[in-house]
Image (cartoon, grey):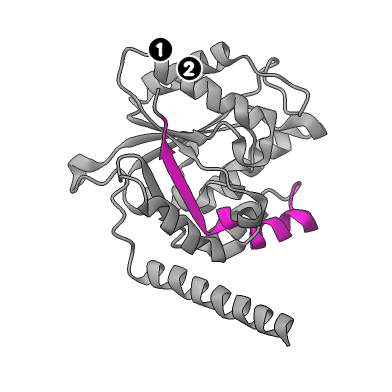
Amino acid sequence: MGWQLIILSLIVLWIASLCKILHTSVSPSKTSFLSNGGDLGKKNVLLVVAHPDDESMFFSPTINYLISRGHNLHILCLSIGNADGIGNIRKRELYKACAVLKVPFQKVKVLDHSDLQDGFGQVWDHKMLAKIIEEEVSSNDIDVIVTFDSYGISGHCNHRDVHHGVRKLVHENSRSIEAWELVSTNILRKYSGSLDVWLSMLSASKYSKRAMHCLVNEQPHKSFHAMAEHSSQWVWFRKLFVAFSSYTYVNTLRKIDV
């Protein structure tokens, strides 16, 4: 009886969480992230990721939020994800996924650099990353950077290197650049799906809006459709990940202070 009550409670909470997300899609949230009002408040934003599919697996709530509010979003992917030898295929898949997420083709850049190879044993030079990202920032007049935090969601070394590259750029650049990191959660929250919406909102409410924001995915179905465009990666365990990952439903962004 006790287990049945727990399971029933989880089902009710899951349904309530989905209703919260659906309500948000009908009545968009008043979240003030990068919103100063009017066209003057529109920002040039650069999302920096390590591999094709990072944008769909982890950052789709942020992407949907920025696009729906008219911000000018650019995506820089620092590798073609060629650990499995199909880098060119994955590059094309990234462009298709970005089309689903309404990010224009010309605003998506994918690098194929000999020193930026996909893999847990591959160490990326932070100084080189900072230089590459700085060039992208300058060429597109970027105001805001969004990337991984120091753990990188999954602990992947490439994700963590990207964070440190961005942090190095923000610390050393004479121009004032605002940077935000996607907060990594513990494994229970990570696989709690839409239930984590409540915990993320509660967590973000403890901080100033200048330090942390919780972005609920107003169109979670886009996350599935975008990830499905990465057909070479769309195997059963990634389908389960997208269904049960909290990052499909909500992103918590924390300002990078240096």
For the question of whether residue 12 can be seen, the reply is yes
Amino acid bearing label 1: Glu
Residue 148 coordinates in the image, percent (x, y): 54, 35
In this rendered view, identify the residue nearer to me: 213 or 205: 205
The C terminus lies in which quarter of the figure? top left
Q: CA distance from mark 2 to mark 1?
A: 6 Å
What's the residue at 45%, 35% (across, down)? 107
In this rendered view, identify the residue nearer to me: 163 or 111: 163
In this rendered view, identify the residue nearer to me: 191 or 58: 191
Residue 87 coordinates in the image, percent (x, y): 73, 32
Query: Dot 1, how many residues are within 10 Å of its Cα: few (below 14), some (14-19), or many (20+)?
Result: few
Dot 1: what SS?
helix
Report the label total.
Answer: 2
The circle drawn on residue 219 is none
Q: Which residues are magenta?
A: 233-256
Dot 2: what SS?
helix
What's the residue at 59%, 53% (across, down)? 226
In the image, 120: left or right of 242? right
Amino acid bearing label 2: Lys
What's the residue at 81%, 34% (across, down)? 84
Q: Which residue is mark 2?
A: 168
In the image, 40: left or right of 142? left
**Farthest residue toward the front?**
2
Does the magenta run of residues contain 35?
no
Q: Are marks 2 and 1 in contact (CB under 8 Å)?
A: yes
In the image, 115: left or right of 237? left
Q: Is residue 112 above or below residue 196?
A: above
Residue 42 found in image quarter: top left
Residue 133 coordinates in the image, percent (x, y): 48, 21
The circle drawn on residue 172 is 1
